[in-house]
Image (cartoon, rainbow, N blue to C red):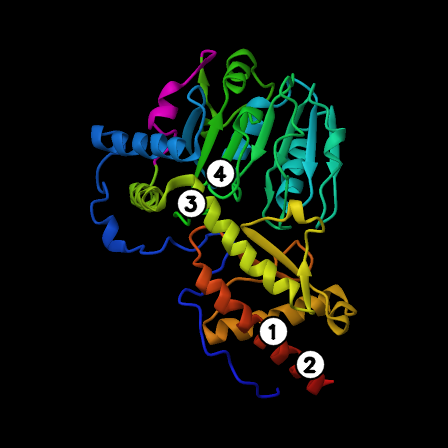
Amino acid sequence: MTEQAKPAVRPANPRFSSGPCAKHPGHSLENLKSAFLGRSHRAAEGKARLAAAIDRTAALLGLPEDYRLAIVPASDTGAVEMALWSLLGARGVDMLAWESFGKGWITDVVKQLKLDDVRLLEAPYGELPDLSQVDFARDVVFTWNGTTSGVRVPDGDWIAADREGLTICDATSAAFAQALDWPKLDVATFSWQKALGGEAAHGMLALSPRAVERLESYTPPWPLPKIFRLTKNGELIEGVFRGATINTPSMLCVEDWLDTLDWAESIGGLDKLMARADENADVLARWVENTPWVDFLARVPETRSNTSVCLKITDPAISALSADEQSAFVKRLTALLETEGVAFDIAAYRDAPPGLRIWAGATVEKSDLEALTSWLDWGFEQARSADAEAA
């Protein structure tokens, strides 16, 4: 391997994982010393903290007052599953997918729920399906931000305001970083461990009045596990949306989330969170523009994510390799950076095309991304020279 001078500046925090994401600046376990531990979460103080987590999250996101928000099991995945199993089947459904998580929801609906009236609107990594083909007389399931492709919908303008069906949106890597069009979303799900770096295993489920009406008027033909049940005797279980969680939550994770909300509110709320993500994504965009060996996986600039920034290697010598050989090159590159302690967990998602995926959400410092870009160039040259010497 050719010796090359290492960059002088290292990221202060090398954690650029797309989930769990970096903790917020200033995070400390000392901040969690008042966690409500060793007590029932159904005690008055436990319920109050859970209710505070719900209410403050709704306020931070600007959730409409007539929407309901709940803490649910199993992260964003659990929240999406709960929505699919509880709400679908009353109408035909359009399933949109342009990356691995969207494809996963298709598997649930087609192979597990085995719905008959399903239309698939799919696109390859780097692109969006033709959104004009969506039929809003039907239910619609989609991800707002494709976490594993770095492709997001540009806005909510394509969603019909007078729709007959429900829109069910997996918004986990978009919430707190992108402007969600709440009146266009009947169901939205996200997790604490994505955009704000909270602890894992807890999801959040937001429901519009139209979604609540569906829950109270429609009973799916399949059995629902206990952790999916949101109604009893045909009525919404209101306690779930006030902190009476379906299963036992981790009150340590709740305390961590409340601390994260403290930070988000202290820096200026949602507008500042989105601005930080945009500024971070701009650092990477400027670097890509001036770097010949890399490009965005997302083809259209307006659909590029400002959180899960996915990149492909365009250097002719590397892009001419097979997919397995490209993956091996990426592993060598990312291993070099991890060994140096300057970047952890930045390889593309396992089902995505070979490349890099760098989290640029609000909990990442702009200065760390600026430092990272020099190390990416160093790592690429080191890995490429090693391959040349081996050949």
Disc number at residue 190?
4
Left or right of 390 in this view: 306: left
Can you identify the residue that label 2 sits on?
Answer: 387
Q: Are marks 3 and 1 in contact (CB under 8 Å)?
A: no
Instruction: First in sequence, mark 1 or 2: give its number.
Output: 1
Residue 220 in picture, x, y percent from top left: 58, 19
Report if residue 91 lies within the magenta region: no
Front in this rendered view, residue 184 or 245? 184
Which residue: 45% across, 30% down? 227
Instruction: First in sequence, mark 4 or 2: give its number.
Output: 4
Left or right of 175 in this view: 55: left
Instruction: First in sequence, mark 4 or 1: give its number.
Output: 4
> What residue type is disc 2 on?
Asp
Nearest to viewer (mark 3 / mark 4): 3
- The C terminus - image quarter: bottom right
> What residue type is disc 1 on?
Arg
Kindly report the distance in space between the C-alpha atoms of the residues bearing marks 3 and 1: 36 Å
Kindly report the distance in space between the C-alpha atoms of the residues bearing marks 3 and 2: 43 Å
Magenta region = 233-248
> What residue type is disc 3 on?
Lys
Disc 1 packing (10 Å; few <14; some 14–19; many ≥20): some
Q: Are marks 4 and 2 in contact (CB under 8 Å)?
A: no
- Kind of element beneath mark 3: helix
Kindly report the distance in space between the C-alpha atoms of the residues bearing marks 3 and 4: 19 Å
Can you identify the residue that label 1 sits on?
Answer: 332
- Kind of element beneath mark 4: strand
